[in-house]
Image: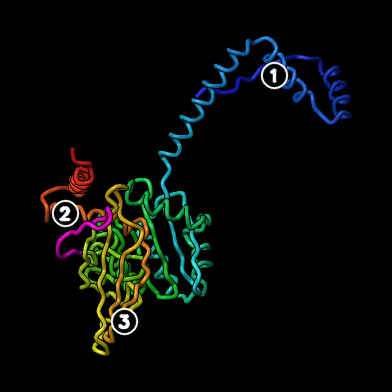
Amino acid sequence: MSGDVQLELWLHEYKLDALSSVLKEQGTTVEKRMQEMLIDLYAELVPYEVQQEIRTRIDAEYTAVQAEAEAARKYTAFCVRENGTQSFFQLDRSESILEAAKFLRRYLREDQGSGVDALQTSAFAGMEPVTAERYDQLLALRMESPGKVTGVFDLDFDRREVSTVDAADGWKTWSMQDVSNAIFHAYRKSCLRPEQYMSRFLEKLEGRELTSPGHLSARDISFAEEITEIDSLLDFYMETGFDVDAAFGTHVCTGENDDTLNVYANYDMAAGQVCDELEVDLHRADGREESVEYRLNAVEKATLLRKMDAYCQEQTGQTLRDYSAQLMAEDMAAQAPQM
């Protein structure tokens, strides 16, 4: 990128001292005055059209440099839940689940009190607070560009759970204690390659995933029955073989009542995206019906979209996009006036 060029001028030191003394009384310096005069000279002598062309070139070069720097940046995102509140943070570098697990092991063993305070004095001390909106952007980027957002960690100190985002499978949730045990197991052998530590760590966590609200994972999502169209939406009936009580705060996975739950995920054909909420219908044994609110985050929506597309191909032989286009075309043809 082009840049400023330094100009060299000469003036006898006695003269410079005298000039500096006068300008100091005026609240300025020789350098500042000379810079102002040089800018005035440029503005006076260089044609306006040329000045505009140069300004455009400088702006374009600056934008290109900024874009290159942004492309090289890596991010890690954190959501911290503690004492019923949420805090969001961004770290401008790449961190893996192994580093988060090491932190959790130290935290649990040393009983460090506040989770947020412990994080801010740990290896993640450089993290900066961000808004919930920025955190949501980072969630979406994790699924779209995993090389850009290399890690997302949701640390729930109230429930003692840790969730992370796998770019292929979406959310994965474990108890903090299981993660602590797994990282201890992973590093019992020394001098291993980084990928070997990761393999040993994940091996220890095999089969220990939890269902957690706000963290529906690929293993929680499966569909049954036909895909139905209602008001330009495609309705997918979700099987409820996972721990729906943990996910939705209900109480149906018990022999204490005969309540049942129906869950539907909807796809907006016109927008080409998963709707923001699940339809969760709670049917009480006494005949009452209730709706349970469940808003989806970017990771859950991306995971659902992949699952919907696979199920649509299985059921119809078409991708979700193609099947939607066919249905919308048929609806338009049916609504067209007959000649």
Which of the pair 167/183 is nearer the observer? 167
Name the residue tied to disc 1: 39
Query: Which amino acid is tagged 2?
Result: Cys
User: Taking 41 as reference, is 126 above or below it?
Assistant: below
Query: Is 291 placed left or right of 20 in the picture?
Result: left
User: Taking 124 as reference, is 50 above or below it?
Assistant: above
Residue 198 percent location from the top left of the image: 28, 59
User: Taking 36 as reference, is 269 above or below it?
Assistant: below
Residue 146 percent location from the top left of the image: 33, 48
Query: Which amino acid is tagged 3?
Result: Arg
CA neighbours of label 2 inside 10 A, class few (<14), some (14 to 19), many (20+): many
Q: Earlier in the sequence, mark 3 or mark 2?
A: 3
Query: Which amino acid is tagged 1?
Result: Ile
Disc 2 is placed on an element classified as helix
Name the residue tied to disc 3: 288
Specify the principal SS of the magenta part: strand
Asked whether residue 178 is drawn in magenta, I would say no
Which of the pair 323/12 is nearer the observer? 323
How far is the residue under mark 2 from the one under mark 1?
A: 65 Å
Q: Give the magenta range.
A: 222-234
Residue at image location 32% in from the left, 67% down from the top: 173
Quadrant for the C terminus, please. Answer: top left
Name the residue tied to disc 2: 312
Residue closest to the far bottom = 256
Disc 1 is placed on an element classified as helix
